[in-house]
């Protein structure tokens, strides 16, 4: 289980019973409140009900602070000034 925070990252190793879901892993980790967050397995967004396979890395995605396109626009404007 991986949860990236600004300037740091939390990782928790879990052992869950067969048939566990992403939602089960989120609850067992105690890392983050699941409401409104997206989840993924190795970079692919999945639903909380997705069944886990042995060795899956569950990722919790925070909302972006700034849209990547807007960030590029701001950097380009700064270079022009």
Image (tube, rainbow, N blue to C red):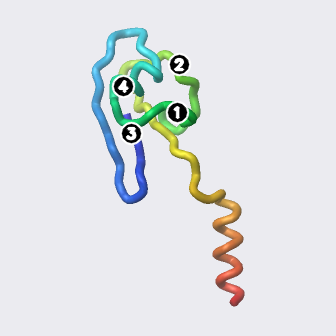
- Label 4 and label 2: CA atoms lie apart by 14 Å
Decide which of tag 1 and tag 4 comes sooner along the chain: 1
76 vs 17: above or below: below
Residue 29, by quadrant, is top left
Residue 39, numbered circle: 1
Decide which of tag 4 and tag 2 comes sooner along the chain: 2
- Image quarter where the N terminus lies is top left
Marks counted in the figure total 4
- Residue 28 can be seen, yes or no: yes
Picture coordinates of residue 44 (x, y %)? Answer: 56, 34
Picture coordinates of residue 15 (x, y %)? Answer: 28, 20
Picture coordinates of residue 62 (x, y %)? Answer: 52, 45
Viewer-nearest of labels 1 and 4?
1
Decide which of tag 1 and tag 3 comes sooner along the chain: 3
Decide which of tag 2 and tag 3 comes sooner along the chain: 3
Residue 55, numbered circle: 4
Picture coordinates of residue 12 (x, y %)? Answer: 30, 35
Q: Secondary structure at mark 1?
A: strand
Relative to residue 29, is residue 47 drawn left or right?
right
Decide which of tag 1 and tag 2 comes sooner along the chain: 1
């Amino acid at each position: 289980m991986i949860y990236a925070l600004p300037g740091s990252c939390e990782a928790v190793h879990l052992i869950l019973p067969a048939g566990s879901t992403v939602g089960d892993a989120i609850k067992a980790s105690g890392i983050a409140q699941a409401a409104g967050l997206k989840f993924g397995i190795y970079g692919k967004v999945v639903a909380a009900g997705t069944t886990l396979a042995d060795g899956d890395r569950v990722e919790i995605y925070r909302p972006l602070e700034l849209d990547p396109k807007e960030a590029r626009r701001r950097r380009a404007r700064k270079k022009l000034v």
